[in-house]
Amino acid sequence: MIHYLCVMVEIQKQIEQYSNEINVFTASDADSLEQFRIRFLGVKGIVKAMLGEMKNVPPDQKKEFGQIMNAFKVLAEEKYNHEKERVDALGGANKSNIDITLPGNPLPVGSRHPVTLMRNSIVEIFQRLSFTVAEGPEIEDDWHNFTALNLDENHPARDMQDTFYLSTDPAILLRTHTSNVQIREMERQKPPIRIICPGRVYRNETISARSHCFFHQVEGLYIDEHVSFADLKQTLYFFVKEMFGEDVKVRFRPSYFPFTEPSAEMDISCMLCKGDGCSVCKRTGWLEILGCGMVHPNVLKNCGIDPEKYTGFAFGMGVERPALLKYGITDIRLFSENDVRFLEQFSGI
Ligand code: DAH
């Protein structure tokens, strides 16, 4: 009897100790959890060993002891399941002893190019006026880049848009403006047409701080019945207010483009000197930002649209110049040099 008593006191003491150990246990990773499992719940584990001690318990106390043993077993199992859930939820990150509470290693993320940022904001404003984006090829034929735009073979205005030819056949060239897309779209679809055409264009020009042999434009075109110059002005007023702010003034100057009649150039008051005159606006107080006009009847005819029924306006603007102004960049060449020190300044914009 004494022997029994001693054994039972001993077992009870041990269970108490092991229970304390289980209660304070937290698995730092999957390995320590596995060690816990082997130690307590394994085939040769403590729980099994304790249960084995039942044979030493006198029959009249087996019931009471059975309950103690069972509670011990459940304690170990529950602890194991709870910790397993937690360790699994950490996705095994603890496996390699990584402190997952530390901030991660930042991955270098690229940033949008300033020209892309400017193009997107131009396009987005016109999309709000229900213009949809249309795109066309950069390698173009003579018809879509020049002839259909009322610039036939010997037209003097071609001089201002000398370009690069892709073969000895002068009919294949790099487009000099995005106006080719208005031709392609008018050939493709019937009015009403309301499109905005962003894209890259090329000209045979000497590269300097202010000009490049390739740059970007956004073209706009609206063709329908009864479209007037008033619609053109109101559309562009809206654009200027949204893009440059309420205080910016706008003026239209008569101009000439073979594909529009009448034609105009649109200036905005210089936002740097507020119209007083500075080096950026060449002391005029104005900055030229786009060309525009009412689509020439010959252009409509060239695309199979009846100029007696339909009228329309078009405009074209460069993307680099407003980007230079907006971001205070002084050399257009920076846009294409791919210098990461320059480009990374636009991250987060
Ligand atoms: N294509 C002209 C250029 O590159 C810009 C332009 C002017 C486009 C008037 C137009 C327009 O659609 O109506 O200089």
Image: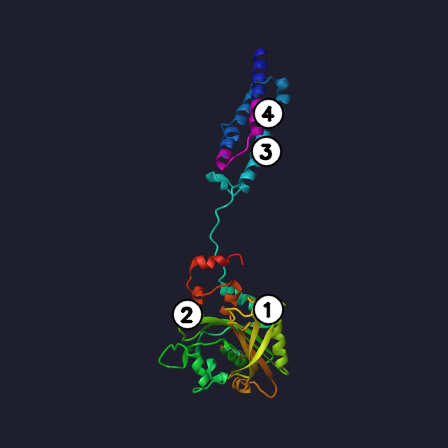
Farthest-out residue, bottom: 308
Residue stretch in magenta: 16-33
Position above or below: 261 against 7: below
| Label 3 crowd (10 A; few <14 / some 14-19 / many >=20) | few
State the residue in front, 279 or 39.
Answer: 279
Position above or below: 307 against 128: below
Cα–Cα span, label 2 and label 1: 30 Å
Left or right of 202 in this view: 301: right
Amino acid carrying label 3: it is Glu
Query: Which is more N-terminal, label 3 or label 4?
Result: 4
Q: Position of residue 258 (x, y in %)?
A: 51, 84
Residue marked by disc 3: 78
Disc 1 CB within 8 Å of nearest ligand 1 atom: no
Residue marked by disc 2: 208
Position above or below: 167 against 84: below
Residue marked by disc 1: 125
Disc 4 CB within 8 Å of nearest ligand 1 atom: no
State the residue in front, 33 or 171.
Answer: 171
Q: Position of residue 81 (x, y in %)?
A: 57, 36
- Tell me the residue at 61%/18% (across/down): 59
Q: Is label 2 or label 1 in front? A: 2
Residue marked by disc 4: 69
Circle 3 sits in a helix, a strand or a loop, which is it?
helix
Tell me whether the residue at label 4 lies in contact with that at label 1, contact meaning CB atoms closer than 8 angstroms: no
Amino acid carrying label 2: it is Ser
